[in-house]
Amino acid sequence: MKKLLYTFVCVFMLILMLVSFSSAASYKTGKYRVSAGAVSVLDSASLMAQKTGEVAKNTYIEITEIKGSFGYCEMKDTGISGWVFLSELTYVSAKAESKVTGLKITSKPKTTVYIEDEDTLDITGLKVSAVYSDGTTKQITGYEVYCPSFSTHGKKTVTVRYLPDGSSTAVTASFTVTVNKVPLKSISVSSKPNKTVYKENEALDLTGLVLTATYTDGRAKKSFTLNQILKDPDFTITTCHNEKQGTKLKAGTHTINIRYKYSDIKTSFTVSVSERKITSLTIKTMPDSLTVYYNTLVPTLDGMVLTAKYDNGETEEISARKCEIICTPSDFVIGDGNKVKVKYEGLSVTVTLRYSPLEADGLTLSLPPVLTFIKGEEIDLSSMKVYLKYNSGKTEEITDYKVSEIDNLTTGVQNVVVSYKEFSEVFSVFVTAVYSKGDVSGDGLIKSEDARTILRAAVGLTSLEGKRFTAGDIDRDNKITSADARLALRAAVGLENFFKKK
């Protein structure tokens, strides 16, 4: 029985192989379509092979190798590869699998001429076909149309974009439309502004202005109010001094030019501006001082402010320095009652001043920045300045003053008297014995240890601050250097004496 069964299986396999080999003669590599239901993908060309995947019905696959009734396929987009039964596939020609390679405009829209800023693209009548790799074409839908702005005139290129099914690369085609200028003939001022005559510095006001545009294509005239003109970017208003609505006007005749859309479509009108005239002049703020002094040529009247009023309703604050000051100082008399006239644009006000002799009344000192000294250090007051002050408030620097003696070996506060003629002024200096020159340890002596500390500070191995820094800075150059250490060492061995009385 077993022998009979074995014989049957062998005969059956032989029949299958004969059928497969006989059928294989009709198979060839190339493009196939899955004609049955989903077809299994096997790991080998054998009836005993294992299933590794599946290909759906109507899927196109490429068979690259034939083994009997099996074909090998590799689909890179899905990652599936293996053997399939060719009997479940239908061989197809390359024509059936042709790919979209481009687009073709087979019929332009009915409307291809438009008017600038008035029309929008109308694609009625547009027909688009896909161009395939085998040379055939097919009308399609589902494309996108990209149109440039019609805000300017000229030729415009409209682009059609199409993304074929299953592709990540779009194909495009284009066609051209014409955008013509608005058929404007002219613009004119049909109503001038309510105000055309101004005073200087009054604001330009175009309220009431109306423009009328006429056209060449028979359409009705169109009027534009001021609000429409100001809001419409197609209008450009220019003037001789770049004035705009609300800008203050200078005296003279001003031409207002208005252009609409194109440089040759324009109109203009004029407004006149007369010079403003002052109507009154008053004193707002009196001068800082109502006293002038002997030898004054013309008072400056510092701090004085006037208020000028004009016939255009404006007011303006005027400094006395902008005015003409009229007086005769040689006629001034000592005391009150001296008149000074302040004139501006034909009007004037009068100020009464007191005349006084110019007299010195004291000293003013500009002291040195450092008034604390170390015992034995030279008292340096060379940067001090001395001024003789006058009753007018002015000062004059003097150099022939005298300074009282200062004892640089006596510690504590010392008053210093600066005198010039019958005037004098006092200030104080302080002389300290702690941390005197070279004595960075503060023990009252200059020793080799002090020189060593200064040298270490000079090379960055330690730091000296405050009074110790002042003591270490022997040459007073505001830094610690090896030169300071050298001076300290010389003082320690008796070759230098920093405590000489000056």
Image (tube, helix red, strand yellow):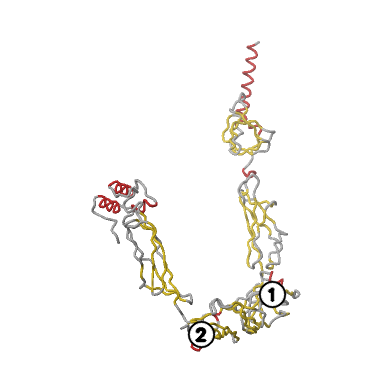
Judged from the image, the secondary structure of the residue bearing numbered disc 2 is: loop
Residue 469 showing in the rendered view: yes
Q: Which amino acid type corresponds to the residue marked 2 in the rendered image?
A: Ile
Q: Which amino acid type corresponds to the residue marked 1 in the rendered image?
A: Leu
Give the image location of residue 288, x and y in percent: 55, 76
Disc 1 crowd, CA 10 A, few/some/many (<14, 14-19, 20+): some
Give the alpha-carbon distance from disc 2 to disc 1, as whole Å: 82 Å
Q: Nearer the viewer, residue 441 or 196?
A: 441
Disc 2 crowd, CA 10 A, few/some/many (<14, 14-19, 20+): some
Q: Which residue shows up at 66% across the image and 80% down it?
A: 268
Q: Which residue shows up at 57% across the image and 36% down it?
A: 64
Instruction: Answer with mark 2 or mark 1, whichever residue precedes in sequence.
Output: 1
Give the image location of residue 222, x and y in percent: 74, 74
Q: Which residue is labeled 2 in the image?
A: 334
Q: Nearer the viewer, residue 224 or 153?
A: 224
Give the image location of residue 6, x and y in percent: 63, 15
Q: Is residue 86 above or below residue 125?
A: above
Give the image location of residue 111, x and y in percent: 71, 64
Residue placed furthest toward the right = 220
Q: Which mark is residue 184?
A: 1
Residue 212 showing in the rendered view: no
Judged from the image, the secondary structure of the residue bearing numbered disc 1 is: strand
Q: Is residue 15 above or below residue 118?
A: above
